[in-house]
Image (tube, rainbow, N blue to C red):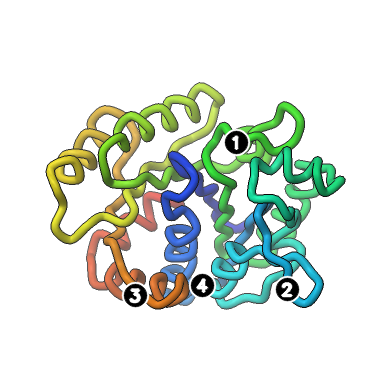
Amino acid sequence: MAAKSIFITGTDTGVGKTIASATIAMLLRRMGHKVAVMKPVTSGCIERDGRLVSEDAELLCYAAGVPVTPDSAPYLLRAPVAPSIAASQDGVRISFDTIKEAYQRLAESNDFVIVEGAGGLMVPLAGGLLVADLAQHLGLPIAVVARPDLGTVNHTLLTVFCARTMGLKVKGVIVNRYPDSPGEAESYAPHMIDSLSGAQLLGLFPDTDGKDDREVTERLVERLLQQPATGIMLRELFD
């Protein structure tokens, strides 16, 4: 049977989408599932030992307990700009069919596949095609990662509205880096998102420190495993 899959997008770049995606992957792995991860397009890759490396894909694969393969990171681009521009600069043509073939190989041999987009839904990937078009091409529902502070209600509602306008199924919203002692804006934002977006609030991922992203992910997973609502969140994501 094909894997259960989700496409993770964000309300913007820098909202912690990779940490959230890695956390979901590690939670599933801790529960005994075989998990694949995928970062179809990464711009701003670093060069290591003469080759381009996606640090986002490395974190995702670490969380899932799998090696980084061409299927988990099909397109590696140098410039830290919109993928369509980075691809043009590198002389690369991004093919959605190539990405879908890689995704299908992962889905055939795993219980779950976590696919992380680049930035938000309206980020251009190739020509006139956007991240939202890639999610649609893969046939995947989406989950939206949002930040907790001022402005997030507007950004999240716009993202959910955009997704539905483009025919995407929205599983819900994860508010990431939620402070242990929220201020006024953080206190009302989750309720407003839940009540106004028409998308379920899947959970609040607490703001968690660590020496690097791997440690942050591990600590976040430990905190979430102590919360009964985490199991509900995973069921809502993949049912």
Q: Amino acid at mark 2?
A: Arg
Badge 2 density bin: few <14, some 14–19, many ≥20, Cα 10 Å: few
Asked if disc 1 and disc 3 are in contact, CB closer than 8 Å, the reply is no
Q: Does 166 appear above or below 177?
A: above
Q: Nearer the viewer, residue 84 or 110?
A: 84
Q: Nearer the viewer, residue 111 or 190?
A: 190
- For the N terminus, give its image quadrant: bottom right
Could you say where residue 84 lies in the image, as x and y percent from the top left?
Answer: 72, 38
Mark 2 and mark 3 lie on one chain; the one further toward the N terminus is 2
Q: Which residue is mark 4?
A: 63
Q: Earlier in the sequence, mark 3 or mark 4?
A: 4
Distance from the alpha carbon under mark 2 to that under mark 3:
27 Å
The residue at the far top in this view is 165
Q: Name the residue type under label 1.
A: Val
Residue identified by numbered label 1: 123
Reading the image, the residue beneath label 2 is: 48
Q: Residues within 10 Å of mark 4 (few under 14, many from 20)?
A: many
Q: Is residue 113 left or right of residue 70?
A: left
Query: Looking at numbered disc 3 in the image, what kind of residue is underneath it?
Result: Arg
Of helix, strand and loop, which one carries label 4?
Answer: helix
* Position of residue 20 measured from the top left corner of the image (x, y, whole percent): 43, 58
Nearer the camera: disc 2 or disc 3: 2
Residue beneath the point at 73% across and 55% down: 78
Crowd rating for badge 3 (residues with CA inside 10 Å; few <14, some 14–19, many 20+): some
Amino acid on which disc 4 is placed = Ala
Q: Tell me what residue is drawn at x 43 percent, y 39 percent.
A: 11
Which callout, 1 or 3, points at the residue further toward the start of the chain?
1
Can you identify the residue that label 3 sits on? 219
Q: Residue at x 70, y 54 (%)?
A: 103
* Mark 3–mark 4 distance (CA, rounded to whole Å): 12 Å
